[in-house]
Amino acid sequence: MIKNLANAVGRRKTSVARVYIREGKGDIVVNGKALSEFFPIEEHQDIVKRPLKVTDMEGKCNILITVRGGGITGQAGACLHGLSRALVELDETNRTSLKANGYLTRDARMVERKKYGQPGARRKFQFSKR
């Protein structure tokens, strides 16, 4: 039976990522695919790996991530947030370095909703005096 050392949930925009840390040699699996396969852009891979680099945990444990909703950048951000929370759950001493880099803060920025009677969130119909 596979035992989770730590698990946490991370969120960004409309994406939700569940992160599980397990014993292993450093494999990162996202939705059943390798990290490089799920996030083909190098920048997104780097975003996901940032908490591991800060805490010197690269190659020390396997990470299983399931992520749903949103776009690719939001999903990468949700993975970063969830992984950071899981690393704190694994070892409380990781908190200071992760908090200093801002990885434990939930980015609350969301897309503004469209209002009724308007063409968009901020856009208004052109005013006509006559």
Image (tube, rainbow, N blue to C red):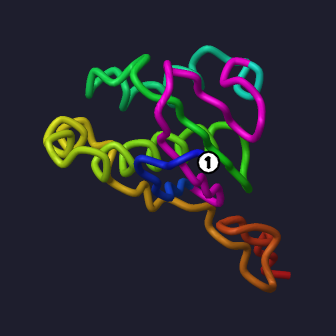
Is disc 1 surrounded by few (<14), some (14 to 19) or many (20+) residues within 10 Å? few
Q: Residue at x 52, y 30 (%)?
A: 62
The image shows residue 55, relative to residue 20, as above or below, that is: above
Foreground of the two, 125 or 84:
84
Q: In the picture shown, does residue 107 fall above or below 72?
A: below
Question: Label 1, on which residue?
Answer: 1
Q: Which residue corresponds to the image point at 23% horizontal and 44% vertical from the top-left?
A: 91
Q: Is residue 1 magenta?
A: no
Decide: is 12 above or below 115.
Answer: above
The percent coordinates of residue 25 (x first, y second) are 49, 19
Q: Residue furthest bottom?
A: 116
Is 109 positioned to the left or the right of 76 in the image?
left
Q: Position of residue 54 (x, y in %)?
A: 27, 25
**From which residue to which does the magenta span run?**
13-36
Expressed as whole percent of the image width and height from the top left, the position of residue 73 reads 63, 37
- In the rendered view, would you say 72 is above or below 119? above
Q: Is residue 129 left or right of residue 41?
A: right
- The answer to whether 83 appears left or right of 111 in the picture is left
Number of disc labels: 1
Front-most of 59 and 119? 59
Residue 115's quadrant in the figure? bottom right
Name the outermost residue toward the right.
130
Along the line of sight, the residue nearer the viewer: 88 or 76: 88
Q: Secondary structure at mark 1?
A: loop
Which image quadrant is residue 129 in? bottom right
Check disc 1 and give the amino acid type: Met
What percent of the width, then of the height, locates residue 93?
A: 14, 42
Q: Nearer the viewer, residue 75 or 60?
A: 60
**Residue in view at x 43 percent, y 54 percent:** 107
